[in-house]
Image (tube, rainbow, N blue to C red):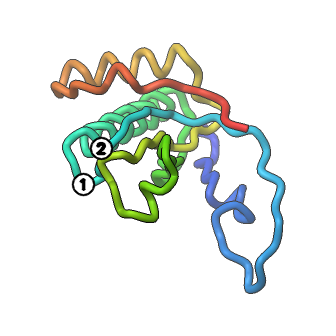
Amino acid sequence: MTAAKVDLKKELRGLYSAPKAPELIEVPPLTYLMADGGGDPSGPEYSSVVESLYGVAYSLKFLAKAEGDDFVVMPLQGLWWADDMDAFLEGSRDDWRWTMMILQPAVVDENMVATAIEQVAAKKDLPVLDRVRLEVYE
């Protein structure tokens, strides 16, 4: 018998749906696949980071499913900043820095991530795949 499919978007509904009125929410520490980069998000580095993250995320899903666990791959999230925050006001996208992230369920661990990265590397040549890491974000 397999476990029920984990859907963190439903379990953490308060973090993934907008209320009718603004409100403050407490966000607990959560575990993400992450990769850092910089520059214009319409450029090749950003695309490669996103492709790497989703490649690893789907490999993790199938590794977990083979062990009797299943989960929904979560949407991409990101942290955006610039050394000079005027870069956002001026639209200087080449000066942006970012960390892109995909939330992971508790079943995912460092060993699974290492295996998933190896699987993706065997199928695709992604120059930024080595940036993908599992990290708790608070």
Q: Position of residue 68 (x, y in %)?
A: 55, 32
Q: What's under tag 1, amino acid-wise?
A: Ser
Q: Position of residue 91 (x, y in %)?
A: 36, 62
- Residue 51 sits above or below residue 88 on the image: above
Classify the position of the N terminus by image quarter. top right
Side (left or right) of 1 relative to 126: right
Q: Residue at x 64, y 52 (%)?
A: 8
Q: Which mark is residue 42?
A: 1
- Residue 15 sits above or below residue 56 on the image: below
Q: Secondary structure at mark 1?
A: loop
Q: Residue at x 73, y 38 (%)?
A: 138
Q: Position of residue 136 (x, y in %)?
A: 66, 30
| Label 2 Cα neighbours within 10 Å, binned few <14 / some 14-19 / many ≥20 | many
Q: Residue at x 74, y 65 (%)?
A: 14
Q: Which mark is residue 31?
A: none
Depth check: give the residue in front, 17 or 115: 17
How far is the residue under mark 2 from the one under mark 1?
A: 7 Å
Side (left or right) of 105 relative to 89: right
Please give the count of numbered marks on the rendered protein: 2
Q: Secondary structure at mark 2?
A: helix
- Residue 79 sits above or below residue 24 on the image: above
Q: Position of residue 10 (x, y in %)?
A: 66, 61
Q: Residue at x 38, y 35 (%)?
A: 37
Please name the residue that numbered disc 2 is placed on.
Answer: 46
Q: Are marks 2 and 1 in contact (CB under 8 Å)?
A: yes
Q: Quadrant of residue 107?
A: top right
Side (left or right) of 16 relative to 52: right
| Label 1 Cα neighbours within 10 Å, binned few <14 / some 14-19 / many ≥20 | few
Q: What's under tag 2, amino acid-wise?
A: Tyr
Side (left or right) of 79 relative to 59: right
Residue placed furthest toward the bottom: 20
